[in-house]
Amino acid sequence: MNTRNRTMTVFSIAAVAMVSLVLTATSANADLVVEEQYIYTAGLIDTQNGGTGFDGAWVSTKSHGQDYQTGITVHAVNPGPTLNDDAGLFFSNLSVGGSALSRFGCSGRAQANRTISAASQTALLGDNTTMWFSVLIGEPLNNNQGSFLFGTEQFSTDIPQVLAAAGDGFGITVANVGTFENGTGTINAIAFDGNTTPIGEEGSFTPNLPGGANFYDTSLIVGKINWKANGTPDELFLFNVTDLQTEPAEGAAIASITNLDFDQSAFDTVAMWDTCSMIQDEIRLGNSFADVTPEIALLTLQVNTVSGGTTILGHPDNNFDINFYEITSSGNSLDVTGWSSLFDQNMSGFPVGTGSGNGWEEAGGVGSHALAEGYLLGNSTIDANASISLGTGYDEGVDDQNLNFTYRTDTGQLFQGLVEYITEPTCSFTLLGDANNDNQVLGNDLTAAKQNFGTVGSDDGCLLGDANDDGQVIGNDITAVKQNFLNVFPASAHAAASAVPETSAMLLRATGAAGLGAWRRRRAG
């Protein structure tokens, strides 16, 4: 992770973006049997021996060309996927760590394999039981032939892909399931039934391909295997998982193979094969869906696509100490004028910086593409279930719904938070003096009333700056804010000290119209 100059007082968005992005945590679930996060120094995967539930190190060979490696951040295929500084994939609030496995180029073929322990076999392979596995996949646009297999044998380095010896196995491939050469983008099921040649079923899911990209978006592919008694076919179901809390129904599978009867007691090998640069990461085998989809707690950016409101939502169960956040938009759908930064709000616990790094200060270069601010010499706490309004920082007129939200904690790690879009107006009038519809009356309500002074609209509580819900923003609204200052709705919802503003400083800032106008002009320029 890059070290920041602690005396710098003007944040650079580009510089902050270079900080290592880590969604950390080695999973602690007792029923997770096998896990490989590729927590290795950059280099060849061959002989690496980390992870959990294995018996022996990785073994990797190639026909010629590119080796299987970890820890490389630049792909030969450019532009490549978004990786953290350890070359690892990340996905929503899935717990991830370390690097990822890829060939980082398209010359030759390579295979990598590793055996699991006898204890892992016992835990996973009983008749009339169910095991689950999960893999993060970054699929290239071209030469997409990579495969992941759990079975009895390793792959050879021939093309099209075959096993080194006749064997059994279930898994995932992005290759064409007819020729097992270049695929079309779908993620498919693969199996070997006592042979060296595979069978497969084409999947119904193709990851999103961003414009101009050479890699599809990262996918979390989860497999469910129902081990039946001998004489009854075993069942493989593959799922594209986006919700880590909801176990998918078998009917929602993107591909399945349900007509093969294996003696799974011999399954002991995790194997990969590729002729290009598919990325595989976060391999997990366990006894339940929850085992292989461990979550980490994250903050959420809630975006109202009707009003443009942007709000940081605390996690239901955890407090977070943060010192930086950034919201970016590839479609320039941010509204820097409507953004009410922490610097603007001057809330207790979120001090305003004075140029020495002693509080929150807006980053240089903010605009429709990015909003960011940081606290160089300290941290502020976002309490569990907190709701911190950032004003109307989203341009609902552009509304590309492609925001990224990242924040840095007091540990120095930069996390990619969740982004939640809501489309219904949530601004029904509930609290006199609340001019920005965040259920509390603070200095940013005075700011909202002044910025929108003279505006006329509806009286449904959605008119920004209308603190008394009469459909217009005039002097009465500023009076309503001052008379109801520090009130909240409901009365007990914001009792924490972190929600109490520094009254005198806030009133001076919010009532200083000339100073506020000058600050807005400097920001826009």
Image (cartoon, rainbow, N blue to C red):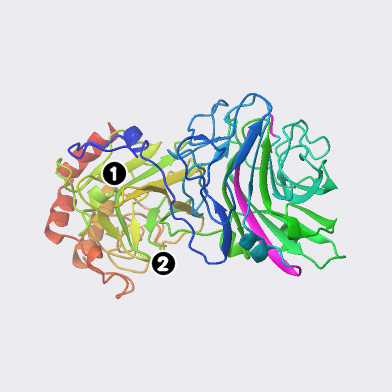
Above or below 403: residue 228: below
Q: Position of residue 24 (x, y in %)?
A: 43, 52
Give the left or right position of residue 197, taking residue 30 as reference. Answer: right
The residue where tag 2 is placed is 316
Instruction: Report the number of discs.
Output: 2
Amino acid type assigned to the residue bearing label 2 in the image: Pro
Above or below 96: residue 372: above
Residue 261 covered by magenta stretch? no
Give the left or right position of residue 251, taking residue 499 as reference. Answer: right
Give the image quarter of residue 158. top right
Give the image quarter of residue 355. top left
Q: Residues within 10 Å of mark 2 (few under 14, many from 20)?
A: few
What is the CA distance from the residue labelled 1 to the residue labelled 2?
24 Å
Above or below 21: residue 364: above
Q: Nearer the viewer, residue 348 or 296?
A: 296
Q: Which residues are magenta?
A: 127-144
Q: Give the residue drawn at x 37%, y 35%.
A: 18
Q: Residues within 10 Å of mark 1 (few under 14, many from 20)?
A: many
Q: In what quadrant of the picture does the C terminus appear?
A: top left
Q: Position of residue 481 (x, y in %)?
A: 23, 62
Q: Give the residue drawn at x 17%, y 46%.
A: 353
Amino acid type assigned to the residue bearing label 1 in the image: Glu
The residue where tag 1 is placed is 373
Q: Secondary structure at mark 2?
A: loop
Q: Nearer the viewer, residue 371 or 489?
A: 371
Q: Nearer the viewer, residue 209 or 302?
A: 209
Above or below 236: residue 385: below
Q: Residue furthest bottom?
A: 492
Q: Secondary structure at mark 1?
A: strand
Residue 132 covered by magenta stretch? yes
